[in-house]
Amino acid sequence: MPEPEATCCQEPEVDFVVLDRIIRDEFGGRREAMIMMMQTIQRRYRYLPEQALYYLSQVLDVPITKIYEVATFYASFSLVPKGKHLLHVCTGTACHLKGSGGMVRHVAGKLGIEPGKTTPDMKFTLETVNCLGACAVSPVVVFDDKYYPQATVGQLNEFIEKVNAE
Amino acid sequence: MKIIMDGKEVAAERGQTIVEVARRNGVYIPTLCHVPALEPAAMCRLCTVELVEGRRSRLVTACNYPLRGDAEIHTDTPMLRQNRKVLIELLASRCPNSEVLKGLAERYGADLNRFPGEEDRQCIMCGLCARVCERVGGNVLALCGRGVEIRVDTSFGRLSPTCIGCASCVRICPVNAIRIEDVDGERRVIVRGKEASRVPLRTCSGCGVHFGPVIDLNPVMERAGESRVPAFNVSVCPACSRRNLARRLAERHFEQREVEPRDAGEEG
Amino acid sequence: MTTASSTAPDLAWTKKISSPQELAPYRQALIESTDPDAPRIRVCCGTGCKAVGSLDVLEAMKTAVAAAGVDVHVMPEVKRTGCHGFCSRGPLLTLEPQGLFYQRVKPEDAADIIRKTVIAGEVIPRFLYKPPGSKETIAKVSDIPFFAKQTKLVLKRVGRIDPFDIRDAIAHGAYEGLAKVLAGMTPQQVIEEIKISRLRGRGGAGFPTGIKWESCAGQPGRHYVICNGDEGDPGAFMDASVMEGDPHAVLEGMAIAAYAMGSDRGFLYVRMEYPLAVQTLAAAIRQAEDLGLIGQNILGTDFSFRTSISTGAGAFVCGESSALMSSLEGKVGRPRAKYIRSTEKGFRDSPSNLNNVETYANVPGIILHGGQWYTTFGTERSAGTKVFSLTGNVHNVGLVEVPMGTSLREIVFGIGGGIPNKKQLKAVQTGGPSGGCIPIPGKFIDINVGFGKLAEIGSMMGSGGMIVMDENTCMVEISRYFINFLVEESCGQCTPCREGLTRMRETLTRITQGEGREGDIELLEEIGQFTNSFSLCGLGTSAANPVLSTIRYFREEYDTHIRNKKCPAGVCKPLYYYEIDPEKCTGCGVCRKRCPAEAIAGEKKKPHTIHQELCIKCMECYRNCKFDSIRIM
């Protein structure tokens, strides 16, 4: 299996023992569980490292193109590292009616990035999510896995300022 | 099984697709993403026809609908023509210079400039290149992304090391967006202006010309269902190979007589 | 001192129940081991209440109970439950045996509640529900219209049981249906009962479930039973609540289906945005396996059915059945044309039965009480009940389960409590991005929910999302919102959806920005017709519905945007600005404090002004002004 060009002379950025544990032990090497393997890998590394995907291709005997298709199809996968703090703004219908669109625009402007992207200093990743199921307390924002009901732009400004002050 | 197409009864076998039946019986149904040798993908939707089974009438794509019972099919109603027109106009916005779209536009009265696009993406997203590459090639091209971001690309956008240089993608692309350049001893496959792969070409030990890509034949033969790689001389180009064979035949046939061997350059 | 629920010595928790006949005594023993008059506090821990801190309330209640100690002769049980449904009032709890309902409870209230209500038996007025526009509070759950007017079949255990404790579910009837099946029904009898019930799929398409099971059962090959838990419609959380609040209803339904079809393998496909549902389902599967209710040799019979959970990875299109199966196989979630049914060749090219969460949750009740019983609810064409998530501009945002055939008026006003802030009801949107908007002026408010009626007027019931819209909702903006959603979620393989919806989005965006042109409506209709006819899958063939239905019923609103460059609802941002009426403004300063752009200036008790160049039009001031002094210009 040819090695990916860019990393042939570098230190491995993934721990193959960890990958083996995920692929073989946790998911029994089942090709059908590939998406869940990738989710577990992403949780570990905060994104999908190329080396990990090539290794997955090797172990599961799946062409790398198929894995790359999956990595680029599903919205939750990222091929570039995410920021330290994840900001998810729910843009479901109930949240939209309560102004979540304006919130996304405001935060995007404040951080200087498009939704879906990460700030250059790798501090923040801003993403939209389609309905978390907490519609009664819209608009909902999830900041670092904590849910903020009836979130306001002011609250979001506070988080961002607090992180920047650290 | 009784199949009526555009009012005429046509010959059909159970399990055949509507397109197969149409082609056998000389009925025209437009297609863009269909090639008989590949599994139908029904992506372009151009071949949509009206199907009436019993009392139920619905729209189905002709390329992949298997006929399993009596049916009536309409391939060219005003509603179908109107929708095909819109389809062509929408495709033209991402691929304005395509000859095949121009031909279809004339047939269906489409205005190729109705939806001006920002750039010529040179692709109608028929998926044929990726499909044929998976089927016979080296699994180089993939349909990456989703929705409007969907695009044909190699893994990680880089030159692919698994290409076998077969150029099936070149031949199959309906809008001629893929080409090969054989230059400097290398075959370069260029997809929509971007290099997808480079495969070294062999050098002929006879005449020195570059010919055919250097590839690992084993996976290809495996996919073709052949168990062994046949023995053959990979260092001689087809022209020289023919010449050598002709010379050997001539020598064997005429070896009792004195015949001057012909010069290589005079080969017909 | 006895505890509210102590297990009798012979109910070893991990011992398998060894025959269908043994489940009833097991349940009986569980029921007998609990004192029905003992105090019980059920704290709602569904996703909505969790978001407002109900887990902290739960902990606080437990701590307060432990602290009360010797003052109590019967120790109250504090238990976490799934969603009670009354989501706009969380954190909330119910107290037995009085049947009290307490809303907006904070952790610091715990000690008070234990002391006054649980021990002393007093009702604390500040936690009581007050219907909008009324001065009287209502103390009992059974008296609150939101609950009283519902018919809970699917949701009967949701909010009553602890989803992490299977014994609670069993004590409340879980697996009775499965035991009845395994005690002596044939697969054909099971299918017959489902057919008699006229149950139709609850995921949106409404295909008769009995017929689907029958056709799948008749196919050769290994059968798979798959549950669609990829509830992707924005604003819908019915399936979430069932999975989070009563996972066993789903598992039991799947097991019964598996028996009917001769299947030994099942999958639950749950969207990744529902981590709590994944947790409750995983715990439920483990505990059910421990007790022999799922897995090898269920209830000691030779019927085996194993099921596992697969998560989605962020793709709405994976709610479509063929895309879901593709995703289950570890591939991209691209739908394929369904000319060969998935009941014939689906997952792994094998006969597969795919049903929605709510559909499976209906099955145990039908088996237990009979298909005939089920038809006593609902209508001729649409039997049974339906769970709706009622959201938007309505007082009582939450989960509502009513018989099919209930009118929109009853749901929005009777149960939903009507429209807040004295606004007028403008439209009700049903069916999510595949559905349409029902305009309210006129007879439509009395239309009955069900599979037929709504479709006749250009909408559809869909999976149950119901969004109430008041006069400040712009119908053009709403259709732009839905089309935008679908453009982002489209898989991209077919031309009509990928290209057609993009053009529609472009057109609608222009219109909402004041750049609409004559002919735009006709263009939207032409492309909408095209995508609805020629698309490959259900996402594409229903995508134009919100646009086409709003054009049909709210055409003047489109015209006003296009011709007059105005948005009558005051929503489309480039077309209007906000202004404070100096005669109404009391200078309270609320807007100034809330404004995130610091665009409002003014002194205390003096009229304030908005600096237009700083205003980002987020609506904070408008939404929070109690004096109605902010005007939309």
Image: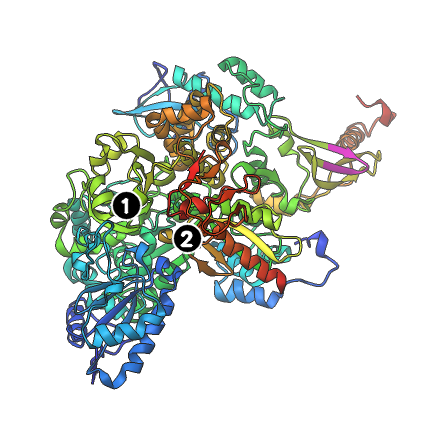
Q: Is residue C450 above or below residue C174?
A: above
Q: What secondary structure prevails in the magenta region?
A: strand
Q: Is disc 2 placed on a helix, strand or loop?
A: loop
* Span highlighted in magenta in the image: B181-188
Q: Would you call the spot at circle 1 few (<14 residues within 10 Å), some (14-19), or many (20 or more)? A: many
The mark found on residue A132 in the picture is 2
- Looking at the image, do the residues carrying marks 2 and 1 touch, with CB atoms under 8 Å apart? no
Quadrant occupied by the C terminus of chain A: bottom right
User: Which of label 2 and label 1 is nearer to you?
Assistant: 2
Q: How many marks?
A: 2
Residue C50, x across and y down, in percent: 38, 62
- Left or right of C601 on screen, residue C138: left
Q: Would you call the spot at circle 2 few (<14 residues within 10 Å), some (14-19), or many (20 or more)? A: many
Q: Is residue C582 magenta?
A: no
Residue position marked by numbered label 1 in the rendering = C202
Chain of the residue under label 1: C
Residue at point 39%, 58% (across, down): C309
Q: Is residue C476 above or below residue B144?
A: above
Residue B60, x across and y down, in percent: 38, 28
Residue at point 78%, 40% (across, down): B235
Residue A18 in view in this figure: yes
Inter-mark Cα distance, 2 to 1: 20 Å
Residue C349 in view in this figure: no
Amino acid residing under circle 2: Leu
Amino acid residing under circle 1: Arg
